[in-house]
Amino acid sequence: MGKILLIEPQNILRHAITLFLFPEHQVRAQEQVSVSEIGSFQDCDLLIVDAAALRENNQLSPDLARALQSCRIPTVWLDEDDSVEVPGDDRLVKLKRPLERQAFQAAISKLLSPERASGEPARSDGVEPGSTALSKVTAGRAGQTGDGAPQPIELVDVVEQEATSKDERKVAKPK
């Protein structure tokens, strides 16, 4: 379980991302952040920043953007603008909005993987997160084939029982 700090000014997205991460991670969400608060983020394992939403609300100053991008915490940077440069660092992953579920989950897994802390590979089978082999395995577990076509999930098992003698008599007697 990772401790994640989410900086998202839009209420509905803040709740949606929190619910997406909830079962596996402890999420603390904030609507806004200041440069002076960045030093207090050291108790978090991952930082998720919606830079596009902060920019839309005029809350993302150049100083704040530099401070967030240069903090030592692994960061998922959500943005719409391709012209905004982010440092090419292994602890910062830039995702374009609108978010794609698999890309978002892969970025979080990459940044929170045990190999970052211990230097050991995260998976013993040699499959990298985000590879097609891994996506086929996870898709199969989720009820999908490797090509993305959903498979029906049977929710009811059919149990055949022989009719009891009372049931047979009721059916056999005409009224």
Image (cartoon, rainbow, N blue to C red):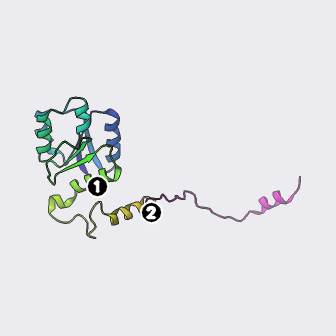
Residue 12 in the figure: left or right of residue 109 = right
Disc 2/disc 1 C-alpha distance (Å): 19 Å
Quarter residue 125 falls in: bottom left
Write the start and end of the magenta stretch as one range: 148-175
Q: Residue 152 carries which label?
A: none
Regarding mark 1 in the picture, which secondary structure is present there? helix
Quarter residue 14 falls in: top left
Q: Residue 106 carries which label?
A: 1
User: In percent of the image, x 28 and y 45: which residue is there?
Assistant: 96
- The residue type indicated by label 2 comes to Thr
Residue 87 or residue 117, whichever sits in front: 87
Q: How far from the left and from the top, in percent, is residue 93? A: 21, 50
Callout 2–callout 1 Cβ contact below 8 Å: no
- The residue type indicated by label 1 comes to Ala
Residue 168 appears anywhere in the view? yes
Q: Is the magenta stretch mostly helix, strand or loop?
A: loop
Is 170 colored magenta in this rendering?
A: yes
Is 87 colored magenta in this rendering?
A: no
How busy is the neighbourhood of tag 1: few (under 14 within 10 Å), some, or many (20 plus)? some
Q: Residue 145 carries which label?
A: 2
Quarter residue 11 falls in: top left
Residue 113 or residue 162, whichever sits in front: 113
